[in-house]
Amino acid sequence: MIIGQIYFEHYWGSNRDNRLANIALTIVITTTYFFQEFCLLQLSILNIKEVAFMQVLSITMVFQNDKNWLWWFLLVLTPPFANMVEVIMGLESWSSWGSWLGESLIFFLLCVVMVNMKKITLQSRYNLAIIALGLIELVTLMVEKQFTLVKFLAPTAGLLVILLIEGQLYRSEIRNNQKIKLLRKKSERDDLTGLLNYRALGRKIKSLTENKEIHDIVIGGLDIDHFKNINDTYGHFVGNEVLNYFSTVLREKIHRAFPKHGYVYRFGGEEFSIVVSNHSIDEVYKLLQSIEEFFGDHPIVTKEGIKITLSFSCSLTNNLKGELLDLTLKRADKMLYSVKNDGRGWIITDQQYKSMKK
């Protein structure tokens, strides 16, 4: 059931913009949750004559995602729900409603505290929450003078099993998440230069356009001038050295000038792209001019002692609000071809391109 709830939540999170889907999934999750709680209540009464384990699922989901209000809501509602079912079944009376709410509130506050104890590992905090649940149930049994060895041992053994299983699942989840992150990182990196690739560019633009703190996005398209001639004259190994040298310099200069706001990508061959946010197109233009001068003053000397002076052609354009990435890239590409057809080795901006077309 926990796995099912996690999948429900994942699907719920992927449909945030669809209000109708969100409402439907909230109803499905809540109904599924309380159906499971009812079955759990029946099983525990049948086997040990005592309601137990009722909040395990909501605790698990709260510690899986403490930002989701629904799990906190269900965590609070679970004890009253269980007690109302007991009243309907003739096992409890309405007069004890105060203790239901008190138990619910105390455990809710304990979970709030433990969720925010960030200096302790998540697994340890989860373990503490489960232990606290067991202790509260034990205290409740003593207060109500219903304590028996069976009622104590059965829930305690059950909670220990839950801790062991959840601990193993938690460790497996961490290992899987690490593998997924590694695979994602590899899938977003160019093998030769280590730069981010086109897939990573799409994700970055999406995250930037959704971030309200971002006010400008400049996208640049770059080509190393006459790279084919370098490959044809000196061979692909020298060509690879050139690509690595070019990408290293470009990345260092962009990251140094625009920390946390500058990114460099390789599309393949001699084609590169840059993305700079929260800086004007003029600032990016000036930096690229200084990089062009750097390459002119610092030619690459290959392992074989071949000296090659590099230059590049570049176009700079702003990603317009609401504009699809493909449209921005097509405009940058069109501008870049105008540079390559007009002698190469220079940088063009939106404004310059518009002036040329008048």
Image (cartoon, rainbow, N blue to C red):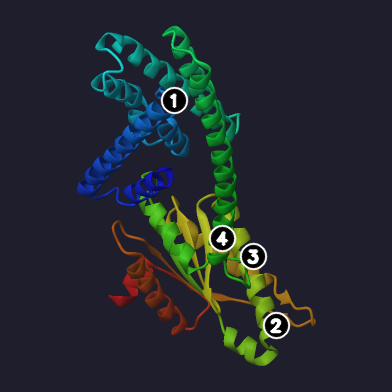
Assess disc 3: are there few (<14), some (14-19) or many (≥20) residues with their C-alpha within 10 Å of its C-alpha. Answer: few
Q: Earlier in the sequence, mark 2 or mark 3?
A: 2
Q: Earlier in the sequence, mark 3 or mark 1?
A: 1
For disc 1, the marked residue is 48
Q: Is residue 230 above or below residue 97?
A: below
Judged by depth in the image, the label closer to the viewer, 2 or 3, is 2
The residue shown at (54%, 40%) is: 166
For disc 4, the marked residue is 185
Quadrant in the rendering for residue 218: bottom left
Judged by depth in the image, the label closer to the viewer, 4 or 1, is 1
In the drawing, does residue 252 fall left or right of residue 102?
A: right
Assess disc 1: are there few (<14), some (14-19) or many (≥20) residues with their C-alpha within 10 Å of its C-alpha. Answer: some
Judged by depth in the image, the label closer to the viewer, 2 or 1, is 1
Assess disc 4: are there few (<14), some (14-19) or many (≥20) residues with their C-alpha within 10 Å of its C-alpha. Answer: few
> Looking at the rendering, in which quadrant would you find the C terminus?
bottom left
Q: Pointer 3 and pointer 1: residues touching (CB < 8 Å)? A: no
In the rendered structure, find residue 358 and report the number of the disc placed on it: none
Judged by depth in the image, the label closer to the viewer, 3 or 4, is 4
Q: Earlier in the sequence, mark 2 or mark 4?
A: 4
Q: Pointer 2 and pointer 4: residues touching (CB < 8 Å)? A: no
For disc 2, the marked residue is 238
> Amino acid type of disc 3?
Val
The residue shown at (44%, 50%) is: 278
> Amino acid type of disc 1?
Ile
In three-dimensional space, the C-alpha distance between marks 2 and 4, rounded to whole angstroms, equals 27 Å
